[in-house]
Every structure is written in structure tokens, then in C-alpha cells.
Amino acid sequence: MKILITGGLGYIGSHVATLLLQNGVDVVVVDNLENSRIQVLDGITSITGSAPVFKKLDVGNETQMDELFTEHPDIEGVIHFAAYKSVGESVSEPLRYYKNNLGGLNQLLKHSINKTIPFIFSSSCTVYGQSENLPISEDEPLKPATSPYGNTKKIGEQIIQDCCKAHPDFSTILLRYFNPVGAHDSAKIGEYPVGVPQNLVPFLTQTVKGIRPVLKVFGSSYDTPDGTCIRDYIHVMDLAQAHVDSLNYLLNKQNSESCEVYNVGTGNGVSVLELIQMFENATGKKVSYELSEPRTGDTIAAYADVSKIEREIGWKARYSLEEALSSAWKWEEMLHKKLE
Ligand code: NAD
Ligand code: WQD
């Protein structure tokens, strides 16, 4: 079986590529390397003992995509990660985000629909905004997006749903990820933020490493038990397994809905201060942090109702947050050994 992974050298895609290769699947990875490095291929190969086929290309480029599907007429599934993901950057460069995230999706859908290839899309809990209800179920009404990035996910979902209505034999799964953290147990692949990390865990590990002087905790008087924001942090290995299980489900299912939406999280809400404490317990390292002003646009609390994916796909998060944070720290240390 041959599966196409777009953005497969990025953070989440590289972990999915690893799991699929370990399951004996032929993997074709495409990536334009705008937010990843070619060395990730070595990491994947070193973990699995086999290399994916790799092609450097832009998924929004029609000619390159036509050539890819001609070269690989036997692709049986598509997992589409390739997109820009910085919320702040999307606010200052909206056109670049709409073009890349929706143009690439358009190309992939064209080929997947033509050949009726099952399709998995990386969506995000960002589509819920600040939900009225917690935990958040897939039925929760979506809020207007607070950034062009978030809007590309909302519009992307809508485009796919419209395609499913028009082509009832085309089957897709939209996975709404909560907050992915951590790295492969081997520390041979992980998250590689370019510039100053915007997300909590890479900023925290860089602070402990001494690259950043202090971690600012954005907001400490929210209406939460300790005043800091609450999120659902999920180990990237669990998230990767959710893709493998979703793909198997799509490939084996008969006569069910052609477009399904699933939350992927742990179901546990954890505050920023709790996460810092868990990191210190898991690694024995002290985190230098200070309470600071809230960050504009942050939702106060978001964690997933994961009963639908558990019930229908049979997937459940297995790793603890302590394990995820240990792996993030191991990766941070390994990364700097490599760069030194
Ligand atoms: P990432 O930036 O590490 O990976 C994306 C990969 O896609 C990168 O390797 C990049 O070089 C590549 N890429 C971007 N545009 C491309 C293009 N036009 N053609 C070919 N390759 C291209 O991001 P990630 O964290 O692995 O996220 C993967 C997907 O999951 C994205 O769609 C993202 O929006 C979504 N997502 C991520 C998170 C998160 O917190 N990491 C949460 C929810 C959803
Ligand atoms: C987590 C918590 C911060 C950094 C973002 C995107 C979202 C999704 C995941 C893709 C929050 C706090 C953070 C810091 C802090 N991506 N924090 N100090 O905001 O839940 O979601 O990434 O779809 O679209 O918006 O994740 O990791 O940035 O923040 O106190 O230096 O950590 O305020 O409460 P977030 P995050």
C-alpha cells in the first residue's frame, strides 16, 4: 500500500511517516522544506531502517502535483499536512497564508477526488475559538476565526465538506488537533521551530536550555483554578497513531458518512502552571518563569471531548503528559548536540 504524506518532513508529518513505514507501508513524502530540513529524512530512516520516497515540491504547484500523481498512480491514501501554521505571521501576511494553505488543499483535492483516494486533513481546535461548553465536542458550533491561519482551517474544512457532498464516493476525515507536544521516543525527530518559538513547550525547553532568559506565562488572573489558561496537550506520537488508525478506518469502512470530523486530544485540561510543574517533576530541571500580561487572542480554556474518535475509530491517547514533556526535553538536548 502506498500513502502520500504532504508536509511529511514537518513536525507532525515526520512522526506519521515513521509509524507508517514501521507498519510496512510505502510512503511518499513531499515537502518544499520551507519549515523543515532535509536532515529529517535521515532521522526517519535511522528510526525505521527504511527511507520514504521523497520529492521536494510545492503542493500548490499544479504541474508538479500532476507529475507526482502520474509518477505514482498507485497512491491509495493522502494525509495532507503541508501548510503554514504561525498565527501571528498569518495576521501580518494573510494573502500568503490563504494562497499556501488553500491553494495546496485545492490541488490535493483535485487528484484525490478524481481517483477517489481517501483523504485526511489536518484541522485544528482553533476552529472552536472560546467554546461555551467544556469539554468541546465535535458538535460545538464553530466561532468566527480570530486569525487568517484559523480561517484557512475553517474554510479548508468547508471546502472538503462541499467536495464530499458533490462526490459521495469520496471519503475524508478531518482531524481537529488540540495542542501537540513532545517528540519521538528516540529523540531522532521532533519539533524544530524556526526563530523564536510561539508555542509554550518549545519556548519552555529553550528557556531551560538557556537560549531564552525567562518563560513569560501569558495571563495569571483568568477565571481558572490557578488563573492561567487551560489546554489539552497531546503527545505527538499519540497524534501520529490517530492518523494511522484513521487511515485504516477510511480504507476499510463501507457505507458510512463520506466526511467525518474527529477531535484528537487527551480529554484532560492542564493549566500553564500545572504544565511547568509537570515538566520540572518529569525532568528534574527548574523552569525560570514569570507571570506576565495576557496574550491577545488567547482562549481561556480548551480541552477535547474525545468520545467520538474512541468510539468510532478505536483510538485513545496512551502517553502521559509527563512522558511527552520528557521527550520534548530529550529532543531539545539532542538538537543542540547536533548543532554544536
Ligand atoms: P510544520 O510546519 O512542522 O509542517 C508542515 C510542513 O509542510 C513543513 O515541513 C513545511 O516545509 C511544509 N510545507 C508548507 N507549505 C508547503 C507547500 N506549499 N508545499 C510543500 N510543503 C509545504 O507543521 P506541523 O506542526 O507539523 O503541522 C502540520 C499540520 O497540522 C499543518 O497543517 C498545521 O496547520 C496543522 N496543525 C498543527 C498544529 C500544531 O500545533 N503543530 C495544531 C493543529 C493543526
Ligand atoms: C499554550 C498556552 C498560552 C507561550 C496555538 C495556535 C493554535 C494551534 C496550536 C495550530 C496558552 C501559553 C504560550 C508562552 C505562555 N495551532 N503560553 N507563554 O495558543 O493553544 O494554540 O498552537 O492549529 O492555532 O493558536 O498554543 O502553545 O501557543 O499556548 O504562557 O511563551 O501557553 O497563553 O495558554 P495555543 P500555545
Image: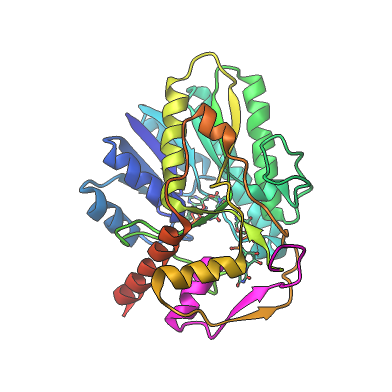
Magenta span has 218? yes
Quarter of the image containing the N terminus? top left
Position of 287 relative to 47 (above/below):
below
**Horizontal arrangement in the rendering, residue 319 relative to residue 293 (left or right):** left
Q: Residue furthest left?
A: 49
Q: Magenta stretch: give its range.
A: 199-226
Position of 147 relative to 67 (above/below):
below
Q: Residue at 54% x, 45% y: name it.
A: 60
Q: Between 160 and 262, which is closer to the camera in this rendering?
A: 262
Q: Residue furthest top?
A: 255
Position of 156 relative to 99 (above/below):
above
Colour scheme shown: rainbow
Q: Looking at the picture, how far across and down is residue 296, in whole percent?
A: 75, 67
Q: Between 73 and 185, which is closer to the camera in this rendering?
A: 185
Q: Residue at 27% x, 57% y: name it.
A: 42
Magenta span has 176? no
Determine the image quadrant of residue 110. top right
User: How many callouts does the rendering have?
Assistant: 0
Q: Between 112 and 67, which is closer to the camera in this rendering?
A: 112
Query: Is residue 289 in view?
Result: yes
Determine the image quadrant of residue 210. bottom left
